[in-house]
C-alpha cells in the first residue's frame, strides 16, 4: 500500500499543523519538571500520534505509550503512569509519556483519573503528552485549561496536493494537475485517502488495459476495491492491508461486510460462521461506544482477518455495493442506529409497548403504513418529529428507502 | 451588507469593542491569543470554528485567509480549492500560488520547517 510506503518517517516530513508541530517541539526542548503537560486535540487522522512518535525518535527519548482505554481508574493509572513519571535513567535521560485518547478516560466521570492526571503532572519527572479526539467534552475542556493545548487539524488541500505530487514523483507517474486535484477534493483533507485514490487510479493500467478514462477514480470504486481486496486476498497480510486502506467508520465497515456476506450465497455452515464474526464485531463496536474504550478499535480489523477471512477465503465472496437488502435484514441493521432507537423509544411510549418490541415487530409495519399520508402526518405529530428536524430527516430517509423497495 | 472582517490566520488583528462576554468567549473558551498592544491572533491553540462562530453571533462576519508556509504571502487569492476549503477546519498555513506549483516544493517546505525549528 502506498499509504504505508509514504507514511512520514521523520517529523519534518509530515504536512499540515506546522505551528502545532513547532510549538510541541519547542515545548519538549524546554520542558523541565513542574512544567505543564501538552494536550493535543484534533480529529483522528490528523497526525497526533504519528507526530509524537516521530518527535520522541528525533529527541532520542524513550516513548512510554499508554492508551487511556487501558487505564480505567485512578489506581490503574497510578500503577501504569506512576513509575514512568518518576523514573529518570542513571544518565539523566528522560522518557516521553504519551497518554493517547484521553477523551475515553474522561468519559468515565467518577473514577478520578482526570483529576489524578492534573495533580500528578506537576510532580512528573518526565514530560507528558496527551491526545484527545473530542476537545468539546467538559472533562477535556477542564484538562486543557491546565495544559498547553495544541490543536491538530486536517492539512489544507494545496498541501495534500503537494504530498500527492511527491508520491506520484516517487512512483514515476505523470499525473495531470486536474486529476490530482480531483483526488484531493474527494479525499477532503485525508492524506491517506488521497494516496489510496491515486494508487487505485493506477491499478488497471498495471494490468495492461492502458485506458486512463476507465480508471478507478471515485471513492466508491476505491471502497469496492478495498473490500474485494479483503475477500479475495491470498493471505492474512494482504487482507489486513486491504481493510486498513478503507477510510470509513467502523460501523459502516461492519455494515458493508454484513451486507456482502448476506448476499454472498455462502453455504449455511460458512454463512453462520461468517455472521457470527460480524456479530462479534458489532458487539465490539457497541462496547466501545458504551465504554469509550476506543483502543479496542484496533481489534476490529484483526477480528475480521483472524475469523472472517478464514471462512471467506477462496469462496468468491464479493463486495455487494449499495444494493439494498430485504426489509427484515435492513430493519435489523437499522436497529443498530441511534435514530431508530430514538424513534422506537418514542413510538414505544405512545403505543405502550417495549422499545424492543417496537423495533423488532412494530416499526416495519408502521413504516409501511406511512405510505398513507394521513397516517404519516398523525404519526409525525404523535412522535413530536416536527420539533426535531434531525430525527425527522432520518425518518424521511427510512421511509424513502421503504418506498423505493 | 456589512463588510467582512479579513483575518489572516496566524497574524495579529484588531476588533471593535464587543463586550466582556464576547471577549471571554473568544479568549478563554475559543483560545484566541490576545495581547493588549498587538490585539488578537488565531494560532495553534485556537478553536477557530468556535471563534468565528462567536464573532458572527456578535455581528462580525469573518473572511479567513491563510498564509504561505514558505514565503508568508497570502495563499488564498487565486487558489483552485478556494470554494471547497473550509478554512476554519484546516491547519493554519498553506502554500501560495507561486510555491504550490513548483516541482521541488515539498523539499522547500520541509526545509522551511527545519529552519523554523532551528529558530
Image (tube, coloured by chain):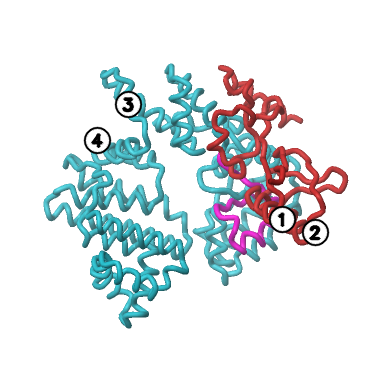
**What element does badge 4 sit on?**
loop
Give the mark, 3 or 4, whose residue is nearer the N terminus.
3
Residue drawn at (34%, 77%) of the image: A348
Label 1 near label 2: C-beta < 8 Å? yes
Q: Chain of mark 3?
A: A
Q: Chain of mark 1?
A: B
**What element does badge 3 sit on?**
loop
Q: Nearer the viewer, residue A200 or A303?
A: A200
Residue A90 is situated, as x and y percent measured from the top left of the image, at 69, 45
Residue drawn at (28%, 46%) of the image: A322
Q: Disc 1 to disc 4, how far (Cα)?
A: 60 Å
Residue B107, by quadrant, is: top right
Residue A232, by quadrant, is: top left
- Mark 2 burial class by Cα count in 10 Å: few <14, some 14-19, many 20+: few
Instruction: Tell me the residue that label 2 is attached to.
Output: B19
Instruction: Tell me the residue that label 4 is attached to.
Output: A234
Q: Disc 3 to disc 4, how far (Cα)?
A: 24 Å
Q: Disc 1 to disc 3, how far (Cα)?
A: 49 Å
Q: Nearer the viewer, residue A379 or A58?
A: A379
Q: Is residue A382 above or below residue A88?
A: below
Shown in red, the chain is B
Q: Disc 2 to disc 4, how far (Cα)?
A: 65 Å
Q: Is residue A114 visible?
A: yes
Q: Is residue B64 above or below residue B95?
A: below
Instruction: Tell me the residue that label 1 is attached to.
Output: B58
Boundaries of the magenta span: A127-154
Residue A188 is situated, as x and y percent measured from the top left of the image, at 49, 39
Q: Is residue B22 left or right of residue A116?
A: right
- Mark 4 burial class by Cα count in 10 Å: few <14, some 14-19, many 20+: few
Residue drawn at (49%, 35%) of the image: A191
Q: Chain of mark 4?
A: A
Q: Is residue A71 above or below residue A4?
A: below
Amino acid at each position: 500500500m502506498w499509504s504505508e510506503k509514504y507514511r512520514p518517517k521523520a517529523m519534518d516530513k509530515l504536512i499540515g499543523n506546522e505551528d502545532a508541530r513547532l510549538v510541541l517541539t519547542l515545548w519538549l526542548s524546554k520542558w523541565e519538571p513542574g512544567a505543564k503537560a501538552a494536550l493535543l486535540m484534533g480529529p483522528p487522522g490528523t497526525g497526533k500520534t504519528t507526530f509524537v512518535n516521530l518527535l520522541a525518535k528525533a529527541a532520542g527519548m524513550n516513548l512510554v505509550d499508554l492508551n487511556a482505554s487501558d487505564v480505567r481508574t485512578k489506581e490503574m493509572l497510578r500503577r501504569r503512569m506512576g513509575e514512568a513519571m518518576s523514573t529518570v535513567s542513571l544518565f539523566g535521560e528522560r522518557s516521553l509519556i504519551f497518554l493517547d485518547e484521553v477523551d475515553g478516560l474522561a468519559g468515565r466521570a467518577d473514577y478520578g483519573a482526570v483529576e489524578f492526571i492534573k495533580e500528578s503532572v506537576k510532580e512528573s519527572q518526565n514530560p507528558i503528552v496527551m491526545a484527545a479526539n473530542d476537545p468539546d467534552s467538559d472533562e477535556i475542556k477542564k484538562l486543557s485549561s491546565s495544559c498547553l493545548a495544541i490543536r491538530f487539524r486536517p492539512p489544507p488541500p494545496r498541501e495534500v496536493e503537494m504530498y500527492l505530487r511527491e508520491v506520484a514523483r516517487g512512483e514515476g507517474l505523470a499525473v495531470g494537475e486536474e486529476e490530482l486535484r480531483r483526488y484531493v477534493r474527494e479525499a477532503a483533507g485525508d492524506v491517506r485517502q488521497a494516496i489510496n485514490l491515486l494508487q487505485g487510479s493506477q491499478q488497471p493500467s498495471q494490468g495492461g488495459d492502458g485506458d486512463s478514462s476507465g480508471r478507478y477514480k471515485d471513492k466508491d470504486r476505491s471502497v469496492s476495491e478495498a473490500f474485494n481486496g479483503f475477500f479475495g486476498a491470498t493471505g492474512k497480510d494482504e487482507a489486513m492491508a486491504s481493510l486498513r486502506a478503507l477510510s470509513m467508520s467502523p460501523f459502516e465497515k461492519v455494515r458493508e461486510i454484513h451486507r456482502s456476506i448476506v448476499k454472498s450465497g455462502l453455504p449455511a455452515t460458512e454463512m453462520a460462521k461468517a455472521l457470527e464474526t460480524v456479530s462479534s464485531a458489532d458487539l465490539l463496536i457497541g462496547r466501545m461506544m458504551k465504554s469509550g474504550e476506543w483502543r479496542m478499535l484496533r481489534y476490529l480489523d484483526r477480528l475480521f482477518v483472524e475469523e472472517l477471512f478464514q471462512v471467506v477465503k477462496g469462496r468468491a465472496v464479493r463486495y455487494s455495493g449499495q444494493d439494498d437488502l430485504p426489509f427484515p435484514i435492513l430493519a435489523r441493521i437499522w436497529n443498530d442506529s441511534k435514530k431508530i432507537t430514538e424513534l422506537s423509544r418514542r413510538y414505544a411510549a405512545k403505543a405502550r409497548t417495549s422499545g424492543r418490541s417496537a423495533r423488532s415487530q412494530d416499526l416495519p409495519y408502521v413504516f409501511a403504513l406511512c405510505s398513507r399520508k394521513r397516517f404519516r402526518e398523525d404519526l409525525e405529530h404523535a412522535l413530536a418529529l416536527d420539533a426535531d428536524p434531525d430525527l425527522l430527516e432520518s425518518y424521511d430517509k427510512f421511509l424513502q428507502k421503504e418506498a423505493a423497495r | 451588507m456589512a463588510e467582512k472582517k479579513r483575518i489572516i490566520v496566524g497574524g495579529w488583528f484588531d476588533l471593535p469593542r464587543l463586550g466582556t462576554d464576547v471577549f471571554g468567549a473568544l479568549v478563554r473558551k475559543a483560545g484566541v491569543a490576545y495581547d493588549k498592544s498587538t490585539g488578537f491572533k488565531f494560532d495553534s491553540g485556537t478553536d477557530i470554528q468556535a471563534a468565528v462562530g462567536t464573532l458572527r453571533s456578535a455581528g462580525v462576519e469573518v473572511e479567513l485567509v491563510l498564509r504561505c508556509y514558505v514565503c508568508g504571502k497570502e495563499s488564498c487569492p487565486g487558489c483552485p480549492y478556494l470554494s471547497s476549503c473550509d478554512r476554519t477546519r484546516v491547519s493554519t498555513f498553506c502554500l501560495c500560488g507561486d510555491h504550490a506549483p513548483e516541482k521541488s516544493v515539498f523539499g522547500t517546505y520541509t526545509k522551511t520547517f527545519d529552519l523554523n525549528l532551528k529558530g
